[in-house]
Image: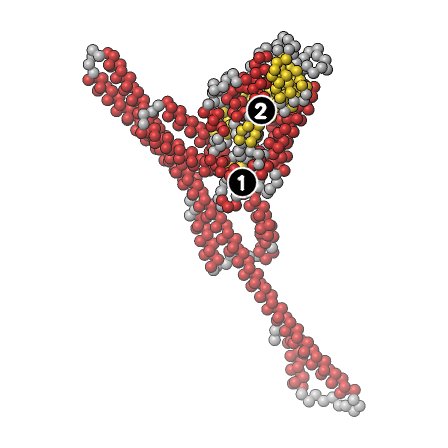
Amino acid sequence: MEAMEGREAVSTVAGLGQGRSAPSALSDNPQAMLTVVVEVERAPGSGPEETCHPTFLLEGPNSIRLLQMGTLETQEQCVTFDRVLHSEAAQEAEQELLAQVQSQLGSVGRGYSVGLLLWGRETEAPRLVPQLLQMLFEEVLSLGGSDPVLHTLSLVQLSPSGRTRDLLSPGAKNLSVLDVAPLGLVVEDASEIEVSDSKAASELYLQATGVESRACSLLTVTVCRPAPHPSEGAGTQSMWRGALRILQLPGALDCPLLQVLAGKVAGEEVEGSLHWIVSWLLEGNNYCGLLLRLGSQGSSLSLLQAALLGAAGRRMQVKQVRPTLWDAAEEARARRAGLKNLRLGLLGDTLSDGRLNQLGRALRELQVVKAWSQRLGNWMRKGVKAEAVGLLEPQQVTNSAASHSPVAGRTSLGPGPQKHSLRDSEEQAQQAPDVALQFFLAQAQRQRLREQQQIWIQEELKHLKQEEEEAAGDQVKGLVAGEEAAQERQRWHREQKVLRLQLEALQAERDTAEQDLLALYDLHVQATRARTCHVLQVFRTWRRLWEEQTMTSEQHHRSLLAGILQDSINLAAQNQELQAQNQQLQQAQTRPGAVMLDRCPGEKSGDQESFRGSFLSPHS
C-alpha cells in the first residue's frame, strides 16, 4: 500500500539531520520492534490455576497458549509477548509498560517519535497517562543543555464514523487527520496548547477527558528543541521535533485495533479513519508499544485470537526509526514553490478531479506547515525578547539612578548643537512610515482588486453565454442528440473556464496579499528602527548635556574655592603683620622713660583704614 510505504520514508531534511548528528544512544541501534504488554482477566469462578480466560492458558510471564473454543485441547500456536500479567496486577502492568518505553521516551527530546496504543482500559483510573507525561518531561529534562524546549499538547476524540472532535476546543468538530511529511500524523486545525511541565500537561489532560474518559481519544505531546549545529550559521532555524502519541481505544471486540492486528482490513484503510490511524502508529516512523487488556467479552473470540497472533508476529518484525530534523520556514517555502507549479499546471492542462484533489491536498498540508512555522517563530521571538529584557535590566537601573540625580533635575536644554540634534531626531521619528495607514491602503487595494476580478469573471460569463446562444441558433433542429452533446460540452467548457478564472483571481489576490504583508513588515521594521534611533538620540543628547552641566558647575565651584583660599591666606598674613606691630608698640611703652611720639600719624591712620577695608572687601 502506497500510504504505508510512504510512512517508512522520512523527509529529506530529517534524513540529512540524522546523518549530521544522530543521538548516540540510538544511532548504535536504529532498529525498533513492537513492545507488547498483555493483561488477562480471570474468568468468573476461576481459581488460582494458570487458566485465566476460557480461551487462554498462561505459560510463564511472557507467553500465552491459545485453547480451542469449547474444549481443553491446546492449539499448537504459542504466542510470546514482552510481558503477560493477571488483571489483579493492573498497576504492575502499567509499571511494566513504563519500564519498557522509558528509553524510547528519552529519545523524544532528540527528534524521535513514540506511539502507544492502549486497549480495554476505559474502566481503570486515569493514572497511566499522567505517569507517561511525567516520565516524558523528566527524560527530556535529563538531556540537559541550555537551549529552550517547546512542549505542546493536543487532544482529540475519534469516532468509528471518521468524525474527529477537539477536546481542548469544544467548538471545533469534523477535523481531519493527515500524514504530513516530515511532521508525521497531525490533526488539521486542532488546538496546540503550550505546556511548561508534566503537572500542567496532566491537569489539562484530566480536565479535558473528565467527561469523555470512555471514548476513543488521541493525545499528542510534541517536543521541539533547536538543533546544536553552529557550523550551519547564525540564521539557521533547524529543530529536532519528536512526539508522543497515545491512542486509547475502548475494549470492544470490533475495535479497529484488533481488526488491523488480525489483518482483516489490510489495504482497505481510508486516510483519516481509525483503521488508518492504527496502521500508521504501528507501521510509521516511530517506536510503538501496545497495552492490551483481555477481558471476558462474549463474542468474536476468533478475531481476538487472530489479533493476538498478529501482534506476536508484528513484535518480531524490525523497522527503521529515524529522528525528525526540519526547518519550518524552509519547508513552507518549498511547499509554496511546489504549489505554484501545481497552479501553473492547472492553468495549462484540462482540469480533472485528480489534479484538483492534489491541489487541495497540497493547500491543506501547506496550512499545517505554516501553522507550525508561525508557532515556532512566535516561540523563538518570545525567548529572544525575554533574553533582551534580562540584558536591559542593569541598564534600566543605571538610567533610573541618573534620572533621579539632583544635578539632572536642574539640567536645561540651552541653545546650541544639542538642540539641532534633537530637532533632527524628532524629524526622523516623524518621517517614520505610518504602518496602520499603509495597512488600510493595502486592504483597500486588495478589495479593489477583488472587485475587479469579480467584474472580469462576470464579463467572461456574459461573453460565454452569448457564444452559446449564437452556437445554439446555428445548430440544426433535427439533431436532438447532437444538440444535447454540444450543450453538455459547452456547459463543461463554461464551468472549466469559470474555475480557471476563479483560480487565477485567487492566485492574484494571494500574491498581492503576500506582497502587502512583506511591504508592511518592512515598513514596521523601518518605523521601529526610526523610533529606536530617536530614543537613543534623545538619551545621548541628554547625557551629553548633563555631563557639560556637571563640568561647568564643577569649574565654577573650584574657582570659588580658590578665591576663598587666597583671601584666607591674605588675611592671615595681614594678621601676622598687625600682631608684630602690636608687640613693638607694647615693648616701646614698657621701656623706662620712653616717650610716646606720633611721628607718622597719617601712616597709622592709613594702616587702620587698610585693616578695616580688608574685612569689608575680601577680594581686595
Q: Is residue 3 left or right of residue 506?
A: right
Residue beneath the point at 47% across and 25% down: 3
Q: Which residue is mark 1?
A: 21
Q: Which residue is mark 2?
A: 315
Mark 2 and 1 residues: CB-CB less than 8 Å, in contact?
no
Q: Position of residue 504 (x, y in %)?
A: 34, 30
Extreme right residue here?
A: 592
> Which residue of the protein is positioned furthest toward the bottom in this rendering?
593
Residue in view at x 53 percent, y 33 percent: 322
Q: Kindly report which numbered mark, 2 or 1, lies closer to the viewer in this rendering.
A: 2
Is residue 533 visible in the rendered image? The answer is yes
Residue 294's place in the image compared with 192, above or below, is: above
Badge 1 marks a residue whose secondary structure is loop
Observer able to see residue 190 = no
Residue 414: x and y in percent read 50, 58
Percent x, y of residue 434: 43, 42
Using a 10 Å C-alpha cutoff, classify the residue at mark 2 as few (fewer than 14 neighbours), some (14 to 19) or many (20 or more): many
Nearer-the-camera pick, 198 or 294: 294
